[in-house]
Image: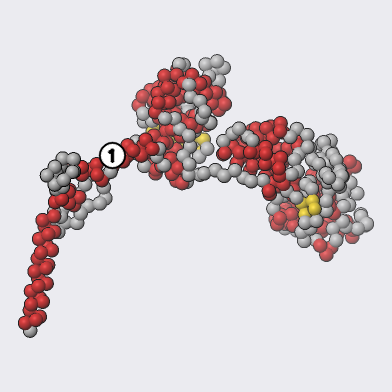
Amino acid sequence: MQTEKAVTRYLESLKGLSDGSLKVYTAHLCKFKAAFVELPGGEIPGDQDDIERSLLRASKSKASRIAMRRTIGRMFEYLVAQDEIAESPIPRAKVGRPRKPARAPAQPALRRPDAEPWRIEDGPDHPQVVKTAAAIDDFMQDRSGLRPKTLDWYRTHFAQFLAAFPGELPMLPGPIQRHIDTMTSSLEWKKTRHQILRTLYKRLADLRRLPADRYGVVNPMVNVRQPKVDKNKPPATLDPDEIVAVIAALERPIERAVFQVLADTGLRVGELLSITRERVHEDSVTVSGKTGEKDLPISPEIRDLLLQLVPSGPVFISPKTHKLYTISGIYQLLRDVFDRAGIEGKRHMGPHMIRHTFARRWIAAGGDVISLRDQLGHSDVSTTQRYAKLEKADLKQKHRQFSLFQQVKGDFGGNGDGAEAGETRTDDVRDELLDPPASGSIVEAKSPKPGKTARTDDVRDELADDELQAEKLTTSGIAH
């Protein structure tokens, strides 16, 4: 019996159900029909393992697979009662109970009948061999609903992985570990590669397309170490000399415009490209990107610069193509500038490095983390706090500015060697520390009278009065 005909007849028998129940049954059976209707002949499956594999492909949720399995089992029971089939491939006692499928046959059924077979070799040393290209193609087809930018991100990683393993997909952790360790990339990029490969192999394990032993499916990614990335380590930035070199290397007007806007706002590259002339306001600019739409303050010079670039529409138009710059185009533009400036040996040289430099200079100049978070558009302040770790030069500057000794060193006479060379004026120092700060501090001395601050002499007089009063009480007690 054909799959489409079986599903149609069973749905006709359910017309007495409520609209909600009928909608659930229809959704389950449509997924079941889509898995088997394109097979040769369109015959209804008679093997329970084929049904189990279709459920794994249809849903990642265990609860959803159990519900679909129950619906399919009831359909087979109906067909048996109508003498359409001899017996149900799903036993009645096990309808609704999860069951792990057996190992896939030599040529497992795929969604696409014309697809390249997964298994290309069998033997005692190679229980199952999978082609890398076929595994990646099937994975990308399964993720076809993702954003185009995310799909391009997957393709970039998979292209490098396919170049390393053009034939068979590695089934041992050793080759995968060497592939990740020998990458000439940052730790963050290596960690991302590990996460993507772990997702790929997990899907193969769910579809039972990995080798198995007596304990179950063997996933090699379980034994591949993930690169450790220090989340608190500040990202690479441009130092002051490099910033001067970059500014000197700006030749074209579009290069100066891109750099100056990024240096004034710290925007992401996607937010930069979202700027239009109509979004430039008196003292702010409206951008949209990763965290939605927002208004950010800009300097008057940057506002005038943006208004001069174009009469209307998007601001950053390529002089060659007369179209809006792409993200890769902005990266290439800034890399050319960095090359002319003689900056080498730093990863990710592009707009995001200027964003990191903007954040680091913000903190070094005395800005706070909360305002920086709002400027950068971080949803979590912990992401912003990594910029708060100052470099040695910045730390030395802050020390010279805020050290306690630097604040009171004027009260030390001479060079501090001996009493005659210069004695410490202790009372003056104590008075200065007790006096309220000029501004910007929440620490203020408590005053004995409203509107006045505590002075050393007043404190000393109060202590003397307390001692005298205590002595009088003691004497009076003895006399009595």
Q: Is residue 243 above or below residue 77?
A: above
Pick the residue in front: 146 or 191. 191
Left or right relative to 302: residue 100: right
Q: How many marks?
A: 1
Query: Looking at the image, which residue is at 34% across and 36% down?
Result: 365
Pick the residue in front: 119 or 318. 119
Residue 362 visible from this viewpoint: no
Q: Quadrant of residue 126?
A: top right
Left or right relative to 418: residue 123: right
User: Residue 176, percent across and down?
Assistant: 69, 40
Query: Looking at the image, which residue is at 16% across and 45% down?
Result: 418
Q: Is residue 103 above or below residue 241?
A: below
Pick the residue in front: 116 or 408. 408
Q: Quadrant of residue 440?
A: top left
Dot 1 crowding, Cα within 10 Å, few <14, some 14–19, many 20+: few
Three-letter residue code for mark 1: Gln
Left or right relative to 93: residue 271: left
